Image (spheres, coloured by chain):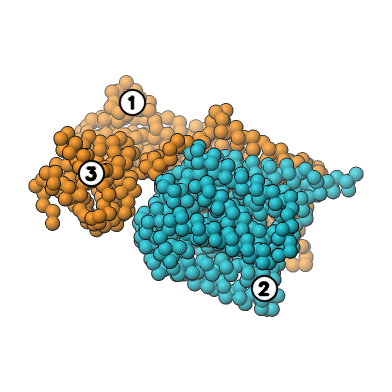
């Protein structure tokens, strides 16, 4: 299995090298882990779609060929510079060793956290390997996406009953990437040398020390992976605009696909982020199409496929009709994307869209409140109770939310709306879903676990604002002196 | 806004004057007493909620109400007219509409008597307005009771009187035959007929004045006067604002202390939302006294933090560090908070996972035997725990079973039968959640086959019907 994990990492490297020069090697070496896992996922899904029986030998050969193809394609693209070896390439080696070492550590030390959902996800993984997409037991793609079950198949290919070690490894790689991005972005906003590092470390600690997040690192579930992918989607979009380096958009495109394949509800937040990015007018038409069309295409095709196979399981969250509505909405989003270069839209409608979006969200919430006023109050109270008291978040949300409201630097963060509206939109979605699904005040409440989706984005945004705040402080002090 | 915030607030407090403060206190008391269970709320919560609300209304009053007052003070005749007209109108309203009391602390008297021609009546679950149970020996000292139930025999009565806030809640049950009971609360009598075995929940009138002391009577009059004052103020302010609006260029409405108001805008918005939430919560009758504290307190904390942050801009750094420290310490035994920890699995197996997550037995059985159950027909012995309604529903629901039969056969295996069965084939053995094991057989060769349940101590065997026949387990039930 170690060899297969190395192969997965090499597959990720094969994808990551296509971003070299334009994105830092250290970051890409970490991304290689995610790319590798995403590559494995795509292979598994495509083979299953074509009803090809999956064996480890076949998969290993296929991935091996893909690695050769990916490196070959890179060679074809940059022939001369291909062998221009830089010391920073060592990061790939170090990250790879780190990935394998942590896999081995957690393989030997079976730290794992689970709930009944984890049990059903492992069965989804078994179903994927045994019956493909034809039969589902207990849970199906109409309840969750299949990314996490696909990750669980890695161990099953080697006769293990599930893959307990993969989630903590994903979490470690994410934390390293999170800190790196936070320091990199923080330095752009701050004129101080150490403050971005101190704040980044504090941000990381405030996030992982929250008990819910800590447990999620070992939890076989979709939540942390959703949080990770949403974080990369939002932050890479922000970095693309802030650094005026559109290579970041490649990261956005890949993680949007991962985000969409994790949970059925993720499509709502993904659509919101796409709309925000489109109406911001910060990306040109080509960039918009290249970044968002792959995800929308994959998601639409996936939805149509699910509609065709109509998976049956007792826990299905969505009905086929609801999925059809979502698919139509996605098609409309594609249309919006296609016509987004229209002059009238760009000049007249898009600048007003953030206000329209916020008003739309507020109106929808108002409608939900009117229709289900007693229930929605209880649900919102449950949401707040879990967030601040019973949801195992310790003091994290108290501080993050308080300072997000309290710290208002005079200098506005570039592309601030992507953070603000994503956070507002996310919580609005939680309220609306509470009206549909109900909620309770225990840590296992779905909405409470879903806070993990947005927490990394909130912490990142807060730390950036604090960087600006402390920079302004220095300026104010020197002005006063 | 910078470090002169304290100076501004100090100046603000000086300038705002008595009326502004009076309005803030009046609004706070009205809101608190009328909607937020002032009298029932424990003292500490009472103080915190009062301070929180009062601070909010003080700022609202001095920023937004003071300019209207300034306008009115400059026009004495208009002010007198508005005050007199509003005062009369509200007084009239108080006379026409019945004044709905609020629960307050007074002497109450409860008498529960059973007529001599009635059957014996049981009084149980006696509690006060906040839901706190009242010990039985406080009600009937020296009388023998059973499990906190008070038995009132025909011709007897119990009397309970003390100073309290709100009402009493209790259950009355006629024990053997239909009976009658007379409940007298502060002199108000109610006769209740009870069917045999019927239990009735009795809630006495929470707004009864009972037999108040002189001090409490004065206090209640003060509460009524305060509400009158609040309502008159609201009407006067509304009319005053309307007059300013109509006056147009004559007087331009300007927020008082605009810089400070702008600085505190987020606090005012947050607190406004929180106060609305508390009122909504009460309007929707979700009874929880602590909720008002939990909801309004963050607004006040935010105000305090905002002021501190303005004076000490490094506050976020300190608080973030302290929070990290607190969160980390929470994992030790130093801070007593429940903590979720990942499990350490030496040999992680799916069965171990499934047992750990603690599903019910039908779920565990189905998960262990997944795929095989869906197309099968299950036969359960009538005496088994799996024949319970919930278990059956669960089995059908999660496996989408076509058929599930409950048959009258003995599912208990003898030791010999158990041994023969175990030796018969290679079983998949799954630890049960409680004790024992599930024994499954690979069914892929005969999909959709009927499966009968057998038991040996805590073990459960799922046996294909062909097997049961061969082993002589197939008793006298008919299965087609």
Q: Do labels 1 and 3 touch, CB within 8 Å?
A: no
Q: Residues within 10 Å of mark 1 (few under 14, many from 20)?
A: some
Q: Are marks 2 and 1 on the same chain?
A: no
Residue that label 3 marks: B425
> Where is B474 relative to A254, above or below?
above
Q: Secondary structure at mark 2?
A: helix
Residue B387 image point, x, y percent: 22, 46
Q: Tell me the shade of chain B.
A: orange
Please tell me which residue is depicted at 11% across the width and 44% down the height of the picture. B472
User: Relative to B289, is B386 on the left or the right?
Assistant: left
The image's mark for residue A285 is: 2
Residue B177 image point, x, y percent: 18, 38
Which dot, 2 or 1, sits closer to the camera? 2
The image's mark for residue B140 is: 1
Label 1 to label 3: alpha-carbon separation: 69 Å
Task: Give the camera-side residue of B468 and B231.
Answer: B468
Chain at tag 1: B
Earlier along the polypeptide chain: callout 1 or callout 3? 1
Label 2 to label 1: alpha-carbon separation: 83 Å
Q: Are marks 1 and 3 on the same chain?
A: yes
């Amino acid at each position: 299995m170690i060899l297969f994990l190395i192969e997965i990492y090499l597959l990720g490297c094969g994808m990551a090298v296509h971003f070299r020069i334009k994105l830092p090697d250290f970051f890409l070496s970490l991304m290689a882990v995610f790319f590798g896992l995403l590559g494995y996922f795509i292979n598994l899904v495509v083979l299953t779609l074509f009803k090809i029986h999956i064996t480890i030998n076949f998969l290993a050969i296929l991935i091996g060929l893909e690695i050769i193809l990916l490196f070959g394609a890179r060679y074809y693209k940059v022939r001369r510079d291909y062998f221009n070896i830089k010391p920073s390439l060592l990061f790939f080696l170090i990250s790879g060793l780190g990935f394998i070492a942590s896999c081995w550590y957690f393989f030997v030390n079976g730290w794992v956290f689970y709930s009944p959902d984890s049990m059903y996800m492992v069965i989804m993984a078994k179903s994927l390997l045994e019956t493909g997409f034809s039969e589902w037991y207990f849970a199906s793609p109409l309840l969750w996406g299949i990314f996490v079950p696909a990750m669980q198949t890695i161990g099953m290919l080697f006769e293990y009953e599930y893959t307990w070690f993969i989630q903590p490894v994903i979490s470690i790689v994410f934390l390293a990437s999170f800190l790196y991005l936070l320091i990199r972005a923080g330095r752009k906003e701050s004129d101080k040398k150490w403050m971005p590092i101190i704040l980044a470390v504090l941000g990381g600690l405030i996030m992982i020390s929250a008990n819910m997040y800590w447990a999620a690192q070992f939890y076989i579930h979709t939540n942390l992976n959703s949080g990770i992918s949403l974080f990369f989607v939002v932050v890479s979009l922000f970095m693309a605009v802030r650094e005026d380096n559109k290579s970041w958009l490649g990261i956005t495109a890949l993680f949007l696909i991962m985000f969409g394949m994790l949970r059925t509800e993720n499509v709502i937040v993904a659509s919101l982020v796409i709309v925000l990015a489109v109406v911001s007018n910060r990306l040109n038409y080509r960039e918009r199409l290249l970044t968002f069309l792959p995800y929308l295409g994959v998601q639409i095709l996936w939805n149509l496929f699910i509609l065709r196979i109509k998976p049956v399981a007792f826990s299905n969250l969505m009905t086929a009709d609801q999925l059809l509505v979502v698919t139509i909405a996605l098609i409309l989003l594609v249309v919006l994307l296609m016509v987004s270069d229209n002059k009238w839209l760009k000049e007249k409608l898009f600048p007003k869209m953030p206000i329209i979006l916020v008003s739309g969200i507020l109106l929808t919430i108002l409608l939900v409140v009117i229709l289900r006023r007693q229930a929605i109050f209880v649900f919102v109270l449950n949401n707040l109770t879990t967030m601040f008291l019973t949801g195992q978040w310790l003091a994290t949300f108290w501080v993050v939310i308080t300072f997000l409201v309290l710290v208002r630097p005079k200098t506005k963060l570039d592309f601030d709306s992507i953070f603000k509206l994503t956070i507002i939109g996310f919580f609005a979605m939680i309220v609306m879903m509470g009206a549909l699904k109900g909620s309770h005040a225990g840590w296992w409440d779905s909405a409470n676990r879903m806070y993990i989706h947005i927490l990394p984005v909130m912490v990142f945004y807060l730390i950036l604002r604090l960087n600006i705040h402390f920079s302004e402080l220095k300026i104010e002090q020197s002005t006063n002196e | 806004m910078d470090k002169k915030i304290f100076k501004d607030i100090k100046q603000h407090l000086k300038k705002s004057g008595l009326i502004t403060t009076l309005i803030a206190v009046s609004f706070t008391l009205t809101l608190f007493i009328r909607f937020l269970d002032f009298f029932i709320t424990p003292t500490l919560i009472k103080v915190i909620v009062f301070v929180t609300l009062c601070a909010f209304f003080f700022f609202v009053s001095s920023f937004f109400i003071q300019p209207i007052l300034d306008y009115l003070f400059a026009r004495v005749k208009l002010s007198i007219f508005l005050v007199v007209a509003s005062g009369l109108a509200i007084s009239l309203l108080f006379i026409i509409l019945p004044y709905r009391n609020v629960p307050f602390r007074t002497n109450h008297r409860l008498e529960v008597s059973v007529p001599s021609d009635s059957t014996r009546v049981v009084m149980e679950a006696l509690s006060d307005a906040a839901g706190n149970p009242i010990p039985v020996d406080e009600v009937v000292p020296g009388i023998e009771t059973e499990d906190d139930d008070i038995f009132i025999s025909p011709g007897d009565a119990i009397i309970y009187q003390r100073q309290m806030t709100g009402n009493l809640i209790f259950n009355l049950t006629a024990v053997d035959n239909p009976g009658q009971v007379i409940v007298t609360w502060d002199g108000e009598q109610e006769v209740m007929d009870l069917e045999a075995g019927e239990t009735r929940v009795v809630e006495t009138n929470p707004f009864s004045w009972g037999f108040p002391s002189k001090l409490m009577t004065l206090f209640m009059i003060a509460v009524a006067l305060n509400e009158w004052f609040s309502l008159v103020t609201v009407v006067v302010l509304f009319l005053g604002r309307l007059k300013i609006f109509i006056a147009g260029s004559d007087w331009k409405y300007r927020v008082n202390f605009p810089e400070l108001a702008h600085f505190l805008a987020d606090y005012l918005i947050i607190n406004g939302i929180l106060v609305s939430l508390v009122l909504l919560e009460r309007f929707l009758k979700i009874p929880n006294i602590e909720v008002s504290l939990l909801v309004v307190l963050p607004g006040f904390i935010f105000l305090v933090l905002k002021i501190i942050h303005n004076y000490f801009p490094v506050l976020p750094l300190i608080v973030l560090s302290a929070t990290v420290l607190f969160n980390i310490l929470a994992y030790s035994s130093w801070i007593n908070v429940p903590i979720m920890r990942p499990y350490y699995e030496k040999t992680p197996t799916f069965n171990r996972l499934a047992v750990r997550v603690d599903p019910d037995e039908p779920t565990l059985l189905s998960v262990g035997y997944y795929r095989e159950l869906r197309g099968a027909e299950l036969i359960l012995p009538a005496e088994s725990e799996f024949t319970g309604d919930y278990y059956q529903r669960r089995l059908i629901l999660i496996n989408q079973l076509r058929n599930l039969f409950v048959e009258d056969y003995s599912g208990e295996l003898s030791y010999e039968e158990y041994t023969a069965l175990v030796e018969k084939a290679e079983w998949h053995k799954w630890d049960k959640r409680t004790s024992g094991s599930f024994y499954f057989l690979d069914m892929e060769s005969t999909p959709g086959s009927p499966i009968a349940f057998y038991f040996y101590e805590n073990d459960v065997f799922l046996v294909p019907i062909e097997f049961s026949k061969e082993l002589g387990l197939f008793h006298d039930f008919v299965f087609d």
